[in-house]
Amino acid sequence: MKFLDLAKVYIRSGGGGGGCVSFRREKYIEFGGPDGGDGGDGGSVYAEAVDGLNTLIDFRYQQHFFARSGQPGMGRQRTGKDGDDIVLRVPVGTEILDEDQETIIADMTELGQRVELARGGNGGFGNLHFKSSTNQAPRRANPGQEGVERTIWLRLKLIADVGLLGLPNAGKSTFLAATSNARPKIADYPFTTLHPNLGVVGVDNVEFVVADIPGLIDGASEGRGLGDLFLGHVERCAVLLHLVDGTSQTIAEDYQTIITEIEAYDGPLGDKPRLTVLNKIDALDADALAEAKAALEAASGGPVMTMSGVAGDGVTDVLRALRAEIDDDRLRHRKASDEEPAPWQP
């Protein structure tokens, strides 16, 4: 299934049915009177976060969603039928944006979350509604309210606990394949990963989700390579795993390239916890490993872990460090929610 994380959708709610002007005309009834019914309400357009979807590919083949209008009222005090609602089924993690692609209408972060995008028009009143003691034969009825038509954008941001960052061929896909059942494409040339991949990783009987995105290169924020279009998929992560190729001759420059692109990206990535790991240590001898680790520590200004995704050396320690960061992030969110003031009560 092709991956699609951005879609333009046109929606329109149904208009309300018009009210009816009608009078009773029955045999043996001396005095008739108004009996026009009200129009039905138009259908509304909703969006709902559902399980089992991880792409917006369905909205490539259908971009228009128009709800049905309500039926007009009829005589004999009959109300028109309401129009059927339309529900857009989107993956969890979908942002719904206005036409300007900046104004966020809703952020679908929870399974089963439902939001109204366009409300259907109200049905008009029939002449029976206007009957009074001073106007016993009203000859007017209201038209139905028009529906709402708008253009929206759907932008998917995958919900994962860990986001993988690094240059092309840093070993991100190999790490994901070695630690989960995901099977991303792995090859010895750059940009083998063309779209994000998700994998469920387990360590010490605890599972968490890891997101692998295409590699960044120098100038990705300006559109070079695959650009930074996929960085949005790691915005929701609790921790970033920055993999650096230990066999590279420019380890410090490789590290700084990713940091520069993260800081140039307009998002919260620069403030997220980050775990720096020197990868592919199985291809280095002891002296080369010590030299590469020292260079990376000098560039990052902090501790550096080492591992080999192929051989499995150090992978468990990295997973445990990621789990600790995830637990700390959840604890921070729990404390922040507990500190919210309770609503005022008299």
Image (cartoon, grey):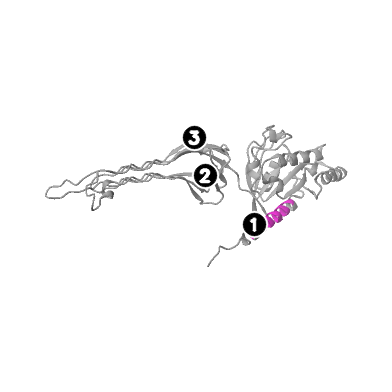
| 323 within the magenta span | yes
Answer left or right for 92 relative to 278: left
Q: Which residues are magenta?
A: 318-334
* Whole-number angstrom distance, CA of label 1 to CA of label 3: 39 Å
Q: Are circles 1 and 3 on residues that touch, CB within 8 Å?
A: no
Can you say whether 84 is above or below 317 in the image? above
* Whole-number angstrom distance, CA of label 3 to CA of label 2: 14 Å
Residue 98 x/y as whole percent? 53, 40
Amino acid at the residue labelled 3: Tyr
Q: Which residue is mark 1?
A: 333
Q: Which residue is mark 3?
A: 61
Residue 308 x/y as whole percent? 76, 45
* Whole-number angstrom distance, CA of label 1 to CA of label 2: 25 Å
| First of labels 3, 2 by sequence position | 3
Secondary element type, mark 2: strand
Can you say whether 340 is above or below 116 in the image? below
Residue furthest right as drawn: 287
Q: Which residue is mark 2?
A: 90
Residue furthest bottom as drawn: 346
| First of labels 1, 2 by sequence position | 2
Secondary element type, mark 1: helix
Can you say whether 79 is above or below 334 in the image? above
Question: Which residue appears at 64% of the width and 58% of the height?
Answer: 336
| 198 within the magenta span | no
Query: Which is nearer the eye, 72 or 252?
Result: 72
